[in-house]
Amino acid sequence: MIVRGNTEFWNCTCHRARDHAVYGMQIHEQFKEVKEDKFHSIYEHDIGVITVIEEFRGLYETAKDYTESSKYWHYSLADFSLTCFGWGHRKSTGIVQQQLRDASIVRDSPENCVRDHGKRVKNMPGVFCAKYYDNNNQFTSGPCPLDEGGPLLGIYDHSQYILIGVIVNAQSCQGGTSLFTNITYYQNWIADYVQGDTNPDSWYR
């Protein structure tokens, strides 16, 4: 198992792609699948910590303090824009993308989150929903199937990036709200496994 970094192309011929072999992985002890009905399910406590053997030292592999995610919840939302990333397929083709995709979205209301993901979400404080609307109040972009596990970044001052969430459930590329794990909610849990060290540079083997 590897973590691919430093490139936006999966089959990169740019000679800068970096693969980091996974050394260890800790999944949340209470992680579980929650079925809303026989057709739909969501995942609770969908978060984990991965350690790798090789350091993240590529030009585009800037390590970030995971506790910075709390800035998003303490500052004005107007100061942030949100962008999610993933390799998932588009529409119904089922083809995994060879180029990393992104979509700009905004946080959705708890009411809409429950409407789209079921009443169980009310009892899941570690998640939130986000969506994208165009000027005609129509969905035009968002996380796609197989994007689950991808990052949601908060961007402020036009150049500062912090990890806000992780994609839990992407209904489709064009419709419905998407469900995200709230990184800030799990900061104490993360700290238990990195021994309080907030510097990701030290998490390699």
Image (cartoon, grey):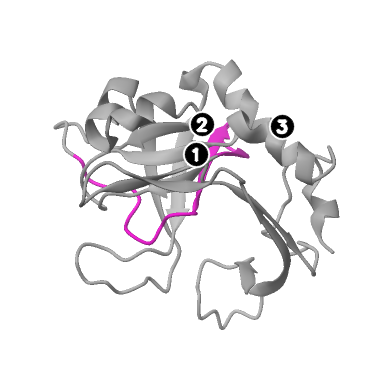
Q: Is residue 43 left or right of residue 160?
A: left
Residue nearer the viewer, 21 or 191: 191
Residue named by callout 1: 181
Against 111, residue 173 (above or below) is: below
For the residues labelled 2 and 1, the Cα–Cα distance comes to 6 Å
Against 161, residue 120 (above or below) is: above
- Looking at the image, the residue that sits furthest to the bottom is 13
Q: Name the amino acid, label 2.
A: Gly
C-beta proximity under 8 Å, tags 2 and 1: yes
Which contiguous range is marked in magenta? 139-164
Q: Is residue 194 left or right of residue 137?
A: right
Q: Which mark is residue 126?
A: 2
Q: Which mark is residue 108?
A: none
Residue 84 seen in this snapshot:
yes
* Residue drawn at (22%, 49%) of the image: 174
* Residue drawn at (20%, 52%) of the image: 39
Q: Earlier in the sequence, mark 2 or mark 1?
A: 2
Does the magenta segment cover residue 147? yes
Q: Name the amino acid, label 3.
A: Asn
Q: Name the amino acid, label 1.
A: Thr
Q: Is residue 161 left or right of residue 165?
A: right
